Image (tube, helix red, strand yellow):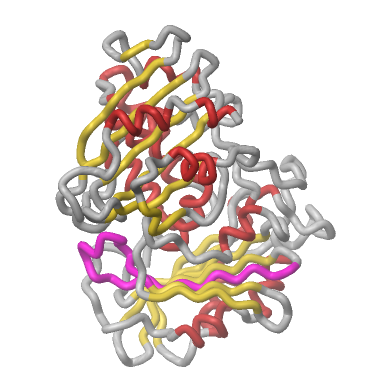
């Protein structure tokens, strides 16, 4: 089974690589859709959280960005002051790890996977080892048939900073507001490792019922093992060949927790050019959730909210007429993309703050879902972007005719001085 580019490096960002290539091809012929850019900008704040879920649970962040074509908004280079800081996954070796480690070959990855799976037939083996470069993490994928039908199974290994952002996010279930699934559990094993088993779908919108089940293990010393399986012989565009993937949650647990993977992680060479500490994530000193909650109209009942503070947050509210998702991104240092977001027709306040309003369909294509957005930027590039939907989640059908907040209420929230606090 050819390993899909979208998942070929679940800990890097292949979408960005494809985007860069596409932008070079597009050149100067692209006509900016500022509404689409605003919708894409609403993704930037939750990008660090979604990048892990996207890699593990079906690529929703890449799909959403590709759907609006709006990644032009985000200057994802390390030199840019507005850029999301680089993921620490590649930059978090175990302290004792040597740059002269023997390395891992794709043959080792493939054979280890086949040895650890229950008895069956294997075909379409593929993989990658560390010989392809220090930033590349090993993976293997096979088509496995236990007599009940062919199924794609893959595994990747790497190391993360113990206790860091990537380690924590790898061990979390995704938020159902953005990624629907059937089941997800997280537990601590006897050796202190944290294991998350997820049972969901290749496509979060269920346009095809290809199931994708995963197991993510993070050990106390930073070993990270990621296993995925499907109920088809390929991740995408393959007919469903069995009712469920071959390994149940207990089987996924056994495969992901096998000691053989940790030995391979230990053999991944360290890149001496990479820093050894994890950078602080964007928005680490912001408190978007608590601020948003304090600014909501008093007649709204909060029935759901994001689990952490930072530069992105959401709440689900209900005014008695149905649920409505409200989300905010607080983005310092966005002045270099001002021209992509605002033009002369947008409102400019006496203090120089620019305000743009966008009303259109929701990002994820839920039936009848609309998205109302107020985008603001102060003179120093401090951006606050507030959006509301007429549904409690973007991938579900509309639950009401319009969002629970008016454009004027969204405007008041976005322009509040409390974001500076």
User: How many circles with numbers are drawn on the protein?
Assistant: 0
Looking at this rendering, what residue extends furthest in the front direction?
Answer: 298
Place of residue 98 in the rendered image (x, y in percent of width and height, measured from the top left): 81, 56
Determine whether 405 is above or below 50 in the image.
above
**Based on the displayed image, in which of its 4 quarters is residue 15 positioned?**
top left
Place of residue 142 in the rendered image (x, y in percent of width and height, measured from the top left): 43, 74
Q: Which residue is drawn at 26% across and 19% down?
A: 29
Q: Which of 229 and 277 is in front in this view?
A: 277
Q: Is 39 on the left-hand or right-hand side of 141?
A: left
Determine whether 133 is above or below 240 in the image.
above
Q: Is 40 on the left-hand or right-hand side of 220?
A: left
Place of residue 8 in the rendered image (x, y in percent of width and height, measured from the top left): 46, 56
Tell me if I can see residue 51 in this picture: yes
**Based on the displayed image, in which of its 4 quarters is residue 225 positioned?**
bottom right
Tell me if I can see residue 142 in this picture: no
Determine whether 328 is above or below 196 in the image.
above
Place of residue 160 in the rendered image (x, y in percent of width and height, measured from the top left): 67, 58
Q: Which residue is drawn at 69% across and 72% down?
A: 262
Residue 109 colored in magenta in the image: no
Q: Which of 20 and 111 is in front in this view?
A: 20
Q: Residue at x 37, y 11 (%)?
A: 348
Q: Which of 199 and 373 is in front in this view?
A: 373
Q: Which of 54 and 421 is in front in this view?
A: 421
Q: Is 301 on the left-hand or right-hand side of 111?
A: left
Residue 207 colored in magenta in the image: yes
Q: In which quarter of the image is the C terminus?
A: top right
- Give the residues drawn in magenta, as a range: 200-220
Q: In which quarter of the image is the N terminus?
A: bottom left
């Amino acid at each position: 089974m050819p390993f899909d580019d979208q998942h070929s490096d679940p800990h890097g960002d292949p979408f960005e690589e494809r985007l860069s290539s596409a932008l070079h091809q597009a050149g100067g012929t692209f006509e900016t859709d500022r509404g689409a850019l605003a919708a894409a900008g609403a993704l930037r704040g939750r990008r660090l959280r979604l990048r892990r879920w996207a890699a593990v649970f079906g690529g929703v962040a890449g799909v959403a960005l590709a759907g609006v074509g709006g990644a032009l908004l985000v200057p994802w280079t390390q030199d840019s002051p507005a850029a999301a800081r680089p993921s620490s996954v590649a930059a978090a070796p175990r302290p004792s790890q040597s740059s002269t480690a023997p390395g891992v070959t794709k043959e080792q990855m493939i054979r280890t996977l086949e040895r650890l799976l229950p008895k069956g037939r294997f075909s379409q083996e593929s993989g990658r080892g560390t010989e392809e470069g220090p930033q590349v993490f090993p993976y293997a994928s096979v088509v496995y048939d236990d007599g009940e039908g062919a199924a794609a199974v893959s595994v990747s290994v790497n190391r993360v900073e113990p206790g860091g952002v990537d380690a924590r996010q790898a061990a979390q279930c995704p938020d159902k507001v953005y990624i629907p699934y059937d089941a997800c559990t997280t537990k601590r094993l006897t050796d202190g490792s944290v294991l998350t088993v997820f049972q969901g779908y290749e496509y979060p919108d269920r346009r095809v019922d290809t199931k994708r089940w995963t197991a993510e293990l993070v050990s106390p010393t930073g070993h990270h093992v990621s296993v995925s399986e499907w109920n088809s012989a390929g991740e995408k565009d393959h007919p469903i060949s069995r009712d469920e993937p071959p390994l149940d949650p207990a089987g996924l647990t056994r495969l992901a927790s096998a000691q053989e993977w940790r030995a391979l992680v230990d053999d991944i060479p360290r890149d001496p050019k990479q820093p050894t500490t994890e950078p602080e994530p964007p928005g680490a000193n912001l408190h978007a959730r608590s601020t948003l909650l304090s600014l909501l109209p008093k007649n709204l009942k909060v029935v759901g909210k994001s689990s952490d503070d930072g530069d992105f947050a959401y709440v689900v509210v209900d005014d008695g007429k149905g649920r409505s998702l409200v989300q905010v991104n607080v983005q310092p240092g966005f002045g270099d993309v001002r021209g992509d977001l605002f033009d002369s027709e947008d409102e400019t306040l006496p203090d120089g703050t620019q305000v743009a309003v966008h009303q259109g369909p929701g990002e994820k294509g839920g039936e009848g879902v609309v998205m109302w957005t107020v985008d603001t930027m102060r003179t120093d590039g401090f951006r606050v972007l507030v959006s509301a939907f007429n549904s409690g989640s973007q991938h579900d059908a509309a639950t009401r005719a319009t969002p629970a907040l008016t454009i004027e209420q969204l405007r008041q929230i976005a322009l509040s001085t409390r974001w500076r606090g």
